[in-house]
Amino acid sequence: MFKETLRQIVESTDGAIAGLLMGFDGIAVESYTRDEAAAGKDIGEIGMEFSVIVGSIKRAAETLEAGHAKEVAIQAENMTTLIRVVNDDYFLALTLRPDGNPGKGRFILRTHAPKLLADLA
Amino acid sequence: MFKETLRQIVESTDGAIAGLLMGFDGIAVESYTRDEAAAGKDIGEIGMEFSVIVGSIKRAAETLEAGHAKEVAIQAENMTTLIRVVNDDYFLALTLRPDGNPGKGRFILRTHAPKLLADLA
């Protein structure tokens, strides 16, 4: 069921390459990669890197009393990654080509997070 | 001269609380805090936390061959932080209230970064 939700997230976002549901411990629950982009990027490797980042952001937000971290967007030259915190244990990541539509991606992540949260329970 | 540029960045962005120019080693070059927001938040502490995060993002982007990280946006319950990488050694951070205008902030950071880059040389 996670795979189907991830497929919807990726296929609904222009320029999206891959979607990932992962624990903050770096262990992936499920991922979905768009066929055309399957060559090259390892979504598991991407997730491992970002689990470290999101973990440190969570800790920083608590230290700074900024409240819970909700969303992170990381724009690099060849890749944009959107991260949505689902709950204290899991996050969603969506990787886009630089010409993708991050605004649409954010919206899609936000609207699909409650479904994933329910499925995780 | 850095202070004046940071002042312009903060004062030009609706809901901005503070701006910071910092090295990836966590040492601040300069910061500017809007008077009304001076109580409470320590911009140096904020910067230290975010230098760790941006450093790990830089390393992840290189590992993933995503190219140089350019921008990071972190949305927490009580605070939004925008980060713009200026060069290999320095980044700009802008902290906003949750009701601030992050789109304007991104634009202002992008247009002011070349000026700061020139001043750092």
Image: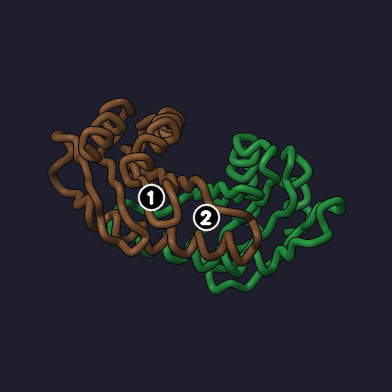
Chain colours: A brown, B green
Where is residue A91? Give x, y as percent. 38, 50
Residue type indicated by callout 1: Phe
Pointer 1 residue? A91
Please count the marks in the image: 2
Residue closer to the observer: B83 or A59: A59
Residue drawn at x 36%, y 35% as measured from the top left: A115
Pointer 2 residue? B85
Extreme-front residue of the structure = A121
Residue drawn at x 53%, y 52% as measured from the top left: A69
Q: Chain of mark 2?
A: B
Residue closer to the observer: A95 or B89: A95
Quadrant in which the C terminus of chain B appears: bottom right
Observer-side mark, 1 or 2, equals 1
Residue drawn at x 32%, y 46% as measured from the top left: A120
Extreme-right residue of the structure = B35
Q: Judge left or right: residue A69 versus residue B94.
A: left
Residue closer to the observer: B67 or B115: B67
Where is residue B44? Give x, y as percent. 69, 68
Say what secondary structure mark 2 lies in: strand
Q: Relative to B13, is B71 above or below?
A: below
Where is residue A112? Give x, y as percent. 38, 33
Q: State whether residue A78 appears in this view.
A: no
Q: Residues within 10 Å of mark 2 (few under 14, many from 20)?
A: many
